[in-house]
Image (tube, helix red, strand yellow):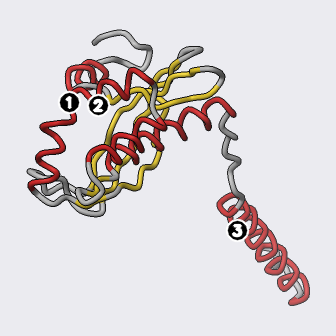
Amino acid sequence: MPIISVSRKKIAGIIAAVLFLGLGIIAIEVLKISRPTPTPTPSVVDTQASAAVVAGVEAFFNVNYQEGKDVWLDRFCQVSTEGGCLFVKTGSAPLWKRYDDSKTITSARVTPQAKIKQSDTEQLWQVSVQLVSPLPGSEKTSDVAYAVAVRANNSWKFDRFLMAEEIRALKTQTPTGQGK
């Protein structure tokens, strides 16, 4: 049987090549992980519509019983459609009585989570709501809300929150909008 002789220099060269190859593979993997993935830039329309939803939801949950119902309604109506303003005004008396009786002072931080539906004149958004303190009758300081923004006179305004039945129907739909 013939004996193969390999010099120490050749062995050191082979080990160096293997180490170099291994380090190269590790470096490539690290670069893949640390390279930021580009996030799509939201459209101007989406940015305006989501900002309208955020403004409306925050105005609705910015409650200070000391300021009074009229200040709360004025603040809300400035950022909402005429129909949205009228809807809240119509139901505001019993709601404000609860706020006044409970001496409610709270505000909200609202963050858009996802655009659910859209048309040329309307967008539906899911938002997260973080309250400074819970509303009367609730212990919750965070929740999810679904709200509609409407394009009015080339600008976007908050229109309304979805009702419970609408949210249930929305949650039973598949991504293509068809029922299960």
Name the amino acid type tagged 2.
Val
Between 163 and 9, the one lying in front of the other is: 163
Secondary structure beneath dot 1 equals loop
Residue at image mark 1: 91
Name the amino acid type tagged 1.
Gly
Residue that appears at 11% across and 47% down: 98
* 177 vs 94: above or below: above
Mark 1 surroundings: few (<14), some (14-19) or many (≥20) residues within 10 A:
few
Residue at image mark 2: 88
Mark 3 surroundings: few (<14), some (14-19) or many (≥20) residues within 10 A:
few
* 172 vs 2: above or below: above
Residue that appears at 32% across and 17% down: 173
Q: Is residue 155 toward the left or the right of residue 139 in the image?
A: right
| First along the sequence among labels 3 and 1 | 3
As drawn, the label of residue 26 is 3
Residue that appears at 13% across and 57% down: 139
Foreground tag (3 vs 2): 2
Kindly report the distance in space between the C-alpha atoms of the residues bearing marks 3 and 2. Answer: 60 Å
Label 2 with label 1: CB-CB less than 8 Å: yes
Kindly report the distance in space between the C-alpha atoms of the residues bearing marks 3 and 1. Answer: 63 Å
Q: Position of residue 95 (x, y in %)?
A: 16, 40
Secondary structure beneath dot 2 equals helix
